[in-house]
Amino acid sequence: MRGLAEALERLALTSPHLLADMGFEMDGGAASPTRTVWRRGRLSVTIERGDVAEVRVETGG
């Protein structure tokens, strides 16, 4: 899973729109002005934008 998480983190930081091409959908209910959340099944990719952008990849179970 770590290799996949690292690849998703890189993708989310450089080209987050490509997550949609991979079947992820934006979760508008979890979004905020500084946070974007993408979900695909049990996977979620959260992008937090502040002084430095951070990405978190999590599995739902």
Image: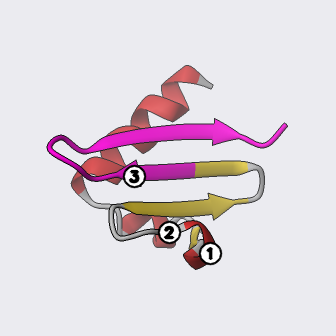
Residue lying at 41% horizontally and 60% vertically, measured from the top left: 35
Q: Distance between the residues labelled 3 and 1?
A: 14 Å
Q: Is residue 52 magenta?
A: yes
The mark total stands at 3
Considering only order in the chain, which callout, 2 or 3, is on the residue closer to the N terminus? 2
Q: Position of residue 13 (x, y in %)?
A: 27, 49
Residue lying at 51% horizontally and 33% vertically, measured from the top left: 5
Which of the image's four quarters has the N terminus? Answer: top right
Q: What element carries label 2?
A: loop
Q: Within 10 angstroms of label 1, few (less than 14), some, or many (20 or more) residues?
A: few
Left or right: residue 19 versus residue 58 is: left
Q: Mark 2 points at which residue?
A: 31
Type of the residue with mark 3:
Ile
Residue lying at 49% horizontally and 72% vertically, measured from the top left: 20
Q: Position of residue 9 (x, y in %)?
A: 39, 40
Q: Mark 1 points at which residue?
A: 29
Q: Which mark is residue 47?
A: 3
Tell me whether the residue at label 1 lies in contact with that at label 2, contact meaning CB atoms closer than 8 angstroms.
yes
Range shown magenta: 45-61
Task: Choose top left, top right, bottom left or bottom right for residue 10.
Answer: top left
Q: Position of residue 39 (x, y in %)?
A: 63, 61
Considering only order in the chain, which callout, 1 or 3, is on the residue closer to the N terminus? 1
Q: How far apart are marks 3 and 2 (CA)?
A: 9 Å
Left or right: residue 24 versus residue 17 is: right
The furthest residue to the top: 2
Q: Distance between the residues labelled 1 and 2?
A: 6 Å
